[in-house]
Image (spheres, helix red, strand yellow):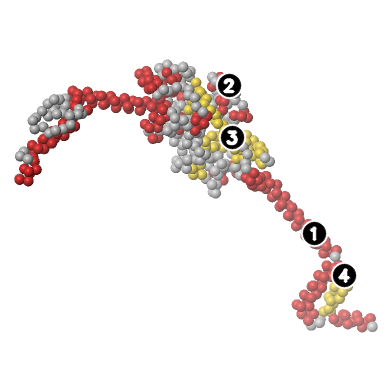
Amino acid sequence: MKFIASLFGTRSPKAMGRQYMKVGRNALFGVTNDNSDNICIEKVPRPLFLLISRKGKFRHGRIAAICLGLLALISYTLVIISAIHYCFTLSTQSKSLPRLITMGLSIFLSGLHMKPFIPITAQELVFGYDDPLVSLGHKFLPKTRRPMSRMGLLLGRNGTLSEISTIFTGHTNMKEFGLINRLNGLDHLPYWPNAPCNSITASEGSFFPPRDQTGADIIHVWDKDFCRTLPLQYRGPIEKAGIKADLYTPTDVLFTRNETAKEDNCFCSDGIDSCPPQGLQDISPCQYSIPVYLSFPHFYKADPKLLDAIDGLKPINNLHKTYFKIQPKLGVPLEAKVRVQLNLKIEQHSNIGVVANFPDIIFPIMWIEEGIEELTPSIRRYIYLATTFADIAVPCLSYGMVLVGLIVIITVFVKAYNSPVLAHEAIELGKRTIRRGSSFLTTSQHRLMVGRDSYILLSNNDIDEKQSMEV
């Protein structure tokens, strides 16, 4: 007890505890104590002083007001964060939004100093530039829909593939040679709801099933930019640098939404009525829901209305078509060009100042061309030797060797028949062989007699009789 009294003074520990709690509360809320035995504290106002009255009690009205203010601030922040998604898709979502929200979006975009057109270089357009709206989306959107930190059409691409593909080698079946079995562990595309739109059974572009084995007139190639597989139709034989090849181009019903192409209606996520015009492919499911559409350059083979809305576009077959030249025996592309145009869908909305002056339009941004035009000399040489040269050399060598063999055999027989020297040497060789191995010569029962160009085997008795008659 003396120790406790010396520690807390003459007061009880309970009273000292209350005093310490009062000091802590005063330090937190900035309230001073009017008692004479007050412990000195800082007399600097605290932010939470508004919650405490002069008597040291909480003011519930002020607490409620501050809580409402905090809730309003949090709600405003959440609205801004959720509005970022609509800002990315306002060109297609704005007409379905209430007027109050669209006005708020307009104010928000004006605060970010957003403009419909900004001056940037071609390098910035392709490889990225800073954009405030994209930066906000990168910070606050869900991870599955989060864009890059910068805005760029080819941002993050360095010529390598990020996907993990499982491909058939053709060891068991050459009809599956070069086809993709799985992409990133999935046997279907996650962007589309059902087959055949979500099918991944296609070539990745380097190898195709040889047409000499399959006889198929339709092949498929996977293209990441299209978010789908492209069907290519056989158009006929062709030659490339003296090598036989097959020409393939996209089917006539590609990017078509009608009764003749029902299998492509699954690319319209909201039904056939929501499908884009002919010649356009909606790729928003794999582009963060941004209203982006792909087409062939200059709206080649697209709806004429799309072409009439833009000045300066002139589609040309040789410059804007996509094609593949594939060697039918090896399934290797000799030449290929994939040409695609990137378009943005814009809809007019009077309540959003950024797009208030725009008409409803499919606005082309740029078109790109990717592929190969010429093989390297070493690869072309190997393909030529394995296909064109081999087709000529193999039968020529086969029949040539047979002919040479026949000529050799006939020549040997003719020379052997017409040459006495050879016959004489052959007989002498046979004679020596007979002398070594014949029992008749050993017992002297038979002898060989030369008769002009041949030898006659006679007995010894006949020879003796002939000699006696001559004598």
Q: Which residue is mark 4?
A: 453
Q: Do the CB atoms of the residues marked 1 and 2 lie less than 8 Å apart? A: no
Label 2: element kind: loop
Q: Do the CB atoms of the residues marked 3 and 4 lie less than 8 Å apart? A: no
Q: In the image, which disc is placed on residue 312? A: 2
Residue 465 vertical placement versus 297 (above, below) = below
Q: Quadrant of residue 29?
A: top left
Please identify, in this view, whether the residue under mark 2 or under mark 4 is nearer the observer.
2
Q: Residue at x 80, y 75 (%)?
A: 431
Label 2 vs 4, first from the N-terminus: 2
Label 3 vs 2, first from the N-terminus: 2
Residue 325 at x, y = what percent? 62, 37
Label 1 vs 4, first from the N-terminus: 1
The residues bearing labels 3 and 2 have C-alpha atoms spaced at a distance of 23 Å
Label 3: element kind: strand
Label 1: element kind: helix
Q: Toward the viewer: 252 or 321?
A: 321
The residues bearing labels 1 and 2 have C-alpha atoms spaced at a distance of 78 Å
Q: In the image, which disc is placed on residue 410? A: 1
The residues bearing labels 1 and 4 have C-alpha atoms spaced at a distance of 23 Å
Residue 371 at x, y = what percent? 58, 36
The residues bearing labels 1 and 3 have C-alpha atoms spaced at a distance of 58 Å
Label 3 vs 4, first from the N-terminus: 3
**Residue 278 placement, left or right of 352:** right
**Residue 133 placement, left or right of 319:** left
Using the rendered image of the protein, determine whether residue 134 is visible from the camera's viewpoint: yes
Disc 2 residue type (three-letter): Gly
Q: Quadrant of residue 420?
A: bottom right
Q: Residue at x 35, y 18 (%)?
A: 100
Q: In the image, which disc is placed on residue 337? A: 3
Please identify, in this view, whether the residue under mark 3 or under mark 2 is nearer the observer.
2
Label 1 vs 3, first from the N-terminus: 3
